[in-house]
């Protein structure tokens, strides 16, 4: 499974570390930061990586690069803004990635559920007289007063003892629709329960809700 942590570029990590060191009091406004070669050795990275880190800090007005003087600390307060900015970016990126992961997991789970329902329906069709827990299909016809009500509002389970596991609607299959799914004209409801609930379901949908 992919990592949930957002990986920062090395130069960005170094810039964040330098900003934290400034906040910790290692440097004050007006102090000279170590030269690029010293920073390169300290962080064990290339001078180019240090150059990019310094550019980032310069863009955020934390340091100023002065020819002949080197890298000068310009603002301690801007370190806070800088760290908050990159904290927010990490949070947004992490949330986006987690959402995409959950969407993919949901899609895979729905595919598995749909496959199992298809298996159950196929099994039921072949062993209809011996299967005690078969799925029933009920078409919601025009004129039924149940149309417009949700599964919860109609107290479907309380009245039938059965559970709605899917809805066929306009060529699509809605899996595990939940209590807030509404009965709509033309729907076919997939319902599971013991054999003795069939009559209860039929009476509830077609007779009690004419």
Image (cartoon, grey):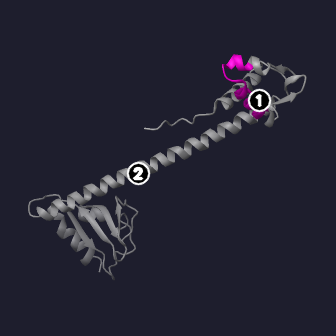
Q: Tell me how many marks there are.
A: 2
Measuring 15% from the left and 65% from the top, which residue is drawn there?
A: 125
Rendered location of residue 48, percent (x, y)? 72, 28
Give the residue pinned by disc 2.
Answer: 106
Between 123 and 164, the one nearer to me in the picture: 123
SS label for mark 2: helix
Q: Is residue 111 visible?
A: yes
Measuring 28% from the left and 56% from the top, which residue is drawn there?
A: 115
Give residue 134's mark: none
Rendered location of residue 162, percent (x, y)? 24, 61
CA–CA distance in space, label 2 to label 1 = 43 Å
Give the residue pinned by disc 1.
Answer: 54
The residues colored magenta run 39-57
Q: Closer to us: mark 2 or mark 1?
A: 1
Rendered location of residue 64, percent (x, y)? 85, 30
Measuring 24% from the left and 60% from the top, which residue is drawn there?
A: 118
Measuring 55% from the left and 44% from the top, which residue is drawn there?
A: 95
| Magenta run includes residue 41 | yes
């Amino acid at each position: 499974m992919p990592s949930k942590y957002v990986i920062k570029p090395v130069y960005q990590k170094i810039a964040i570390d330098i900003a934290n060191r400034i906040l910790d009091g290692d440097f004050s406004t007006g102090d000279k930061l170590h030269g690029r070669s010293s920073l390169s050795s300290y962080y064990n990275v290339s001078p180019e990586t240090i150059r990019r880190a310094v550019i980032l800090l310069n863009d955020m007005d934390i340091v100023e690069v002065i020819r002949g003087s080197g890298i000068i600390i310009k603002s301690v307060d801007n370190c806070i803004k800088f760290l908050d900015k990159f904290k927010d970016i990490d949070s947004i990126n992490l949330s986006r990635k987690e959402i995409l992961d959950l969407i993919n997991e949901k899609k895979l789970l729905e595919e598995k559920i749909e496959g199992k329902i298809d298996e159950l329906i196929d099994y039921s069709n072949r062993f209809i007289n011996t299967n005690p827990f078969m799925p029933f299909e009920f078409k919601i016809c025009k004129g039924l007063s149940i149309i417009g009500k949700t599964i919860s509002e109609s107290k479907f389970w309380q009245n039938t003892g059965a559970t709605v596991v899917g809805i066929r609607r306009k060529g699509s299959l809605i899996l595990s629709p939940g209590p807030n799914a509404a009965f709509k004209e033309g729907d076919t409801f997939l319902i599971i329960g013991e054999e003795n609930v069939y009559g209860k379901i039929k009476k509830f949908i077609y007779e009690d809700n004419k």
